[in-house]
Amino acid sequence: MAPGVGERSCRVCRRKADKKALLRLVIREGNRIEADPGQTAPGRGWYLCRTEQCLSILNNPKMLRKVFGRPIQAGTAVIGNAQ
Ligand SMILES: [Zn+2]
């Protein structure tokens, strides 16, 4: 595989990894964030490591705002899908 192909950076810690190893998130209408386990949902995707540290932002509205630059709502469904 050529360098960089299929690689994405974690939005939180900037670590690069194969996108299949990361959790894809999409932001829906109303700034609602959803997990996209199949990595096929339309729209701009964001990637997070599947580590407790990076996933923990989903529980933290202040961090979500910092990371995405706007207020984001995360539902419990996001957390459930992330695990
Ligand atoms: Zn990360």
Image (spheres, rainbow, N blue to C red):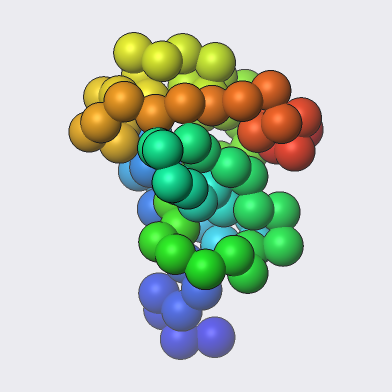
Residue 8 seen in the figure: no
Q: Position of residue 66 (x, y in %)?
A: 26, 24
Q: Is residue 24 left or right of residue 37?
A: left
**Residue that appears at 54% across and 16% down:** 59
- Total labels: the figure holds 0
Quarter-wise, where is residue 8 in the image?
bottom left
Residue extending furthest toward the front: 30
Q: Position of residue 37 (x, y in %)?
A: 71, 54
Q: Examine the rendered structure and indicate whether residue 44 appears above or below residue 46.
A: below
Residue 66 seen in the figure: yes
Quadrant showing the C terminus: top right
**Residue that appears at 65% across and 33% down:** 78
**Residue that appears at 40% across and 74% down:** 4
Q: Is residue 15 left or right of residue 39?
A: left
Q: Position of residue 82 (x, y in %)?
A: 70, 36
Quadrant showing the N terminus: bottom right
Q: Examine the rendered structure and indicate whether residue 6 appears above or below residue 38.
A: below
Q: Is residue 16 left or right of residue 81?
A: left
Q: Examine the rendered structure and indicate whether residue 42 appears above or below residue 47.
A: below
**Residue that appears at 57% across and 52% down:** 24
Q: Examine the rendered structure and indicate whether residue 40 appears above or below residue 21.
A: below
Nearest to the observer: residue 62 or residue 31: 31
Nearest to the observer: residue 81 or residue 5: 81
Nearest to the observer: residue 82 or residue 10: 82
Residue extending furthest toward the bottom: 2
